[in-house]
Amino acid sequence: MPDASISGSDSRRAGTRIVGFGIAAIVAILAGAGLVLLLTLPDANAFNARVERLFVESDLTTGTEIKLLEILAQSGTAFADTLASYRMVIFVLLVFATAMMVAALVFLVLLAGLNRRMAQIERAGIQVNSLLISREENTVYLNNMDFKLTAAAMETLSVLAEARLDDEVLSGAEIEATISGRDASDCEEAAGATRIKRLRDTLGNQMVSELLVKNIARRGYMLAIEKDVIRMV
């Protein structure tokens, strides 16, 4: 148990470091890209500066020439305003892209952690604190979940529970023999396997059913829980 705790703490610390480095890398890359993009944009006052230079160096006398110069000045102002709006749009898009990439990184790390947790559960088996089998109600209470079973599924689960109490592993033929009252040599392995499949189908939840009812190769079936948590009424 201490080793598992240490391993879990190390995994959490490693995950936190990965998230931190990833966020820093994303922010640095996008900040660098935004800086380069903003620096390569033309100067907003470049057009106005050219118009001003034209006004200083030219000898404008007619009203038409002065009017043209005024139009050019207004165009320069509009150009400057447009570039300013472009810079604001680029800034907003960079902030949005940073937020999206950080969120994607966090979700990927959380998903990886969840997958590791699911793998640990699959290796260790389902953690059952209580398993109450009520034959009268045809219901099994597993921790805080209740499953309504058919009569056939209840018989199969009861047989598996009784075998688990005796530390026994039952083959498909033995399960069929116990339920039908016949000799195991007269029963087929497939008949018991069919009962197990129907029990799993009735439980519905794939994770619960696959982890609760274990299939041991070349031996048979058993409940993958501690026998002291089993109660039958």
Image (cartoon, helix red, strand yellow):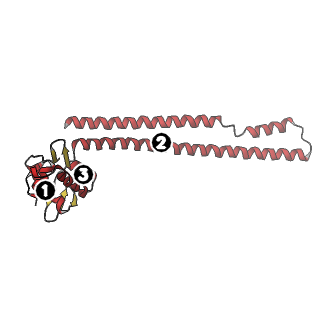
Q: Amino acid at mark 2?
A: Met
Residue 111 horizontal side relative to residue 40, left or right: left
Q: Could you tell me which quadrant the C terminus lies in?
A: bottom left
Q: Which mark is drawn over residue 158?
A: 1
Q: Is residue 230 visible?
A: no
Rendered view: 120 above or below 186: above
Q: Residue at x 74, y 45 (%)?
A: 77
Element assignment for label 3: helix
Residue 62 horizontal side relative to residue 221, left or right: right
Nearer to the camera, 17 or 147: 147
Instruction: Using a 10 Å C-alpha cutoff, classify the residue at mark 3 as few (fewer than 14 neighbours), some (14 to 19) or many (20 or more).
Output: some
Residue 149 horizontal side relative to residue 13, left or right: left
Instruction: Using a 10 Å C-alpha cutoff, classify the residue at mark 1 as few (fewer than 14 neighbours), some (14 to 19) or many (20 or more).
Output: some
Element assignment for label 2: helix
Q: Which of the two marks, 3 or 1, is nearer to us in this view? A: 1
Rendered view: 140 above or below 125: below
Residue 142 horizontal side relative to residue 69, left or right: left
The earlier-in-sequence mark between 3 and 2 is 2
Q: Position of residue 113 (x, y in %)?
A: 33, 41
Q: Amino acid at mark 3?
A: Val
The image quarter containing residue 41 is top right
Q: Are marks 2 and 1 in contact (CB under 8 Å)?
A: no
Q: Which residue is mark 3?
A: 208
Q: Which residue is mark 2?
A: 101
Toward the bottom, the furthest residue is 136
Q: CA distance from mark 3 to mark 1?
A: 17 Å
Nearer to the camera, 186 or 91: 186
Q: Is residue 211 visible?
A: yes
